[in-house]
Image (tube, coloured by chain):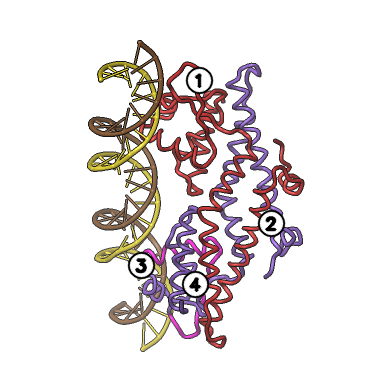
Chain colours: A purple, B red, C yellow, D brown
Amino acid sequence: MDLAEGKLKFIEAWGKLGSEWGINRTMAQVHALLLISPEALTTEEIMETLSISRGNANMTLRDLINWGLVEKHHKAGERKEYFFAEKDTWTIARQVAAERKKRELDPVIKVLNELAAIEGDEKDPEYKTFKTSVSDINKLAKNVNKTLETMLKAEENWFWGSIFKIFK
Amino acid sequence: MDLAEGKLKFIEAWGKLGSEWGINRTMAQVHALLLISPEALTTEEIMETLSISRGNANMTLRDLINWGLVEKHHKAGERKEYFFAEKDTWTIARQVAAERKKRELDPVIKVLNELAAIEGDEKDPEYKTFKTSVSDINKLAKNVNKTLETMLKAEENWFWGSIFKIFK
DNA sequence: ATAAACTTTCATTTGTTTTTGAAAGTTTAA
DNA sequence: TTAAACTTTCAAAAACAAATGAAAGTTTAT
């Protein structure tokens, strides 16, 4: 396999993984393309390489910027905007974790807290099962939350280092 | 909020979370319903409660069984099949992690290894950037993999226990 | 062997998400 | 101020994923 094939395969694999984890396939592909590009790329180049429309490219790039994974660069004496991806893996993982925590975990924890507060007849099996499930999941969610917060705070952390044997 | 409202809200929240993480919404909802049911339920009851068709219920239940999250129960002297969910949160997390690792992480690691083996000109920035990104992600993937394997092996592990403060 | 009770399948339909591309908007240079 | 260069928007179309339900299949009791 040569470099050109490898690039395509990488973009494809990253896109597939993204879509399995609830991230738009195109967004993951654009991200992959920028990850393996030494230089910042223009919208045109991205459209061309991935065969996507201008509108799609524009919206996807905006999303990636909102996720903190991509930034706009300007080149002196040029009108065009160039896009460039953060390439440090630890930073990418942190950004994604932070974004999903905010969008998904936080709202779920809110609901779980409300549900955990529901009162009822301790002798009713319906109530007891509900209560137990909700409170167990609530505990898990809170622990995941705490772990994520630690991870997000860590600039580069001994704790995660010891778990993941981080490289960088 | 009373118990009946709470149940609906739980099912809804679980379904939404599932769909954000690439798990079919209905599948997550059926799982939620079974989680808060003290008794095993029939297909009929599940169809009725969630307003879904027989075919959908059947396929969803089969998927849940394949994921190891639900099991069929039989009641003496009855023809009908009853469905019952594993309720231990740690076990659920383990099953889901195992399944997704197998379906998603393992194939990605395979591709990354192939890509990491590509050779090229070290002076070509295209090649160098590709190489570095692939190898960094490969390292991360391998570490995630190792961590998951540890987690899956642990019947009940002091290390993860201390991280998640697991109950069980 | 048969028919009732129950389960599974799968071609269609329905619903959701993503993409397109033309039009509108903005910025810059002259 | 104007027009060219470039970016953004968004309604409509296409692509994709999930759900339906009638028909086919299976099991059990007699």
Using the rendered image, report if marks 4 and 2 lie on a common chain.
yes
Q: Position of residue A121 (x, y in %)?
A: 63, 17
Q: Are marks 1 and 2 on the same chain?
A: no
1 vs 3, front mark: 1
Nearer-N-terminus badge (2/3): 3
What's drawn in magenta, residue-wise?
A53-79
Residue sitting at 56 percent across and 28 percent down? B36
Q: Which residue is mark 3?
A: A52
Q: Chain of mark 3?
A: A
State the separation of the CA atoms marked 1 and 2: 48 Å
Asked whether A37 falls inside the magenta stretch, the response is: no
The residue under label 1 is B75
| Spatial CA span between label 2 and label 3 | 35 Å
Whether residue B2 appears in this view of the structure is: no
Q: The residue tagged with tag 2: helix, strand or loop?
A: helix
Q: CA distance from mark 1 to mark 3?
A: 56 Å
Residue receiving disc 2: A151
Q: Where is the N terminus of chain B found, in terms of image quarters?
A: top right
User: Real-space Cα distance between discs 1 and 4?
Assistant: 58 Å
